[in-house]
Amino acid sequence: MEDKLLYRVTEVAEYLSLSRSKVYELVRAGVLPSVRIDGSRRVRGDDVLAYVESLRRAA
Protein backbone atom coordinates (compact mmCIF):
# COMPACT_ATOMS: atom_id res chain seq x y z
CA MET A 1 0.00 0.00 0.00
CA GLU A 2 2.43 2.63 -1.12
CA ASP A 3 0.61 4.09 -4.13
CA LYS A 4 -1.28 6.76 -2.19
CA LEU A 5 -1.06 8.43 1.20
CA LEU A 6 -4.68 7.72 2.19
CA TYR A 7 -7.01 4.83 1.36
CA ARG A 8 -10.77 4.36 1.61
CA VAL A 9 -12.03 1.73 4.03
CA THR A 10 -13.22 -0.37 1.10
CA GLU A 11 -9.71 -0.33 -0.39
CA VAL A 12 -8.20 -1.36 2.93
CA ALA A 13 -10.75 -4.15 3.27
CA GLU A 14 -9.89 -5.45 -0.18
CA TYR A 15 -6.15 -5.25 0.48
CA LEU A 16 -6.49 -7.17 3.76
CA SER A 17 -9.13 -9.59 2.43
CA LEU A 18 -11.52 -8.47 5.16
CA SER A 19 -15.06 -7.19 5.10
CA ARG A 20 -15.70 -3.47 5.19
CA SER A 21 -17.44 -3.85 8.55
CA LYS A 22 -14.41 -5.66 10.02
CA VAL A 23 -12.16 -2.76 8.99
CA TYR A 24 -14.57 -0.31 10.65
CA GLU A 25 -14.48 -2.52 13.75
CA LEU A 26 -10.66 -2.32 13.79
CA VAL A 27 -10.88 1.47 13.37
CA ARG A 28 -13.43 1.82 16.21
CA ALA A 29 -11.26 -0.34 18.48
CA GLY A 30 -8.28 1.92 17.79
CA VAL A 31 -6.27 -0.97 16.35
CA LEU A 32 -6.16 0.63 12.92
CA PRO A 33 -5.72 4.43 13.07
CA SER A 34 -7.76 6.53 10.67
CA VAL A 35 -8.64 10.13 9.86
CA ARG A 36 -11.94 11.72 8.99
CA ILE A 37 -12.11 14.20 6.12
CA ASP A 38 -15.48 15.83 5.46
CA GLY A 39 -17.41 12.75 6.59
CA SER A 40 -15.14 10.28 4.81
CA ARG A 41 -12.99 7.83 6.73
CA ARG A 42 -9.46 7.35 5.40
CA VAL A 43 -6.59 5.13 6.52
CA ARG A 44 -2.91 5.85 5.91
CA GLY A 45 -1.09 3.20 3.93
CA ASP A 46 1.71 3.18 6.52
CA ASP A 47 -0.84 2.39 9.25
CA VAL A 48 -2.18 -0.57 7.27
CA LEU A 49 1.34 -1.94 6.88
CA ALA A 50 2.05 -1.36 10.60
CA TYR A 51 -1.14 -3.25 11.47
CA VAL A 52 -0.06 -6.22 9.33
CA GLU A 53 3.38 -6.17 10.97
CA SER A 54 1.76 -6.19 14.42
CA LEU A 55 -0.13 -9.33 13.42
CA ARG A 56 3.12 -10.96 12.38
CA ARG A 57 4.74 -10.18 15.75
CA ALA A 58 1.70 -11.47 17.67
CA ALA A 59 1.67 -14.79 15.81
Image (tube, rainbow, N blue to C red):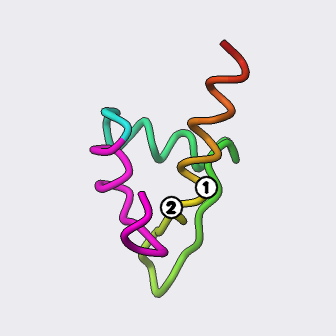
Q: How many marks?
A: 2
The residue wearing badge 1 is 47
Q: Are marks 2 and 1 in contact (CB under 8 Å)?
A: yes
Give the amino acid type for the residue marked by disc 1 in the picture: Asp
User: For mark 2, does the 10 Å Cα neighbourhood hold few (<14), some (14 to 19), or many (20 or more) residues?
Assistant: some
Q: Between residue 27 and residue 44, name the one nearer to us.
A: 44
The residue wearing badge 2 is 45
Judged from the image, the secondary structure of the residue bearing numbered disc 1 is: helix
Give above or below for 35 relative to 29: below
Q: Is 10 inside the magenta-drawn segment?
A: yes
Residue closest to the far front: 2
Residue drawn at 54 percent across, 75 percent down: 36
Give the x, y percent position of residue 57: 72, 23
Question: What range is drawn magenta here?
Answer: 1-15
Q: Is 40 inside the magenta-drawn segment?
A: no
Give above or below for 45 relative to 50: below
Give the x, y percent position of residue 40: 42, 75
Q: Quadrant of residue 2?
A: bottom left
Judged from the image, the secondary structure of the residue bearing numbered disc 2 is: helix
Q: Quadrant of the N terminus?
A: bottom left
Residue closest to the far top: 59
Give the x, y percent position of residue 47: 61, 55
Q: Quadrant of residue 55?
A: top right
User: For mark 1, does the 10 Å Cα neighbourhood hold few (<14), some (14 to 19), or many (20 or more) residues?
Assistant: some
Give the amino acid type for the residue marked by disc 2 in the picture: Gly
Q: Between residue 25 and residue 15, name the one nearer to us.
A: 15
Give above or below for 32 relative to 35: above
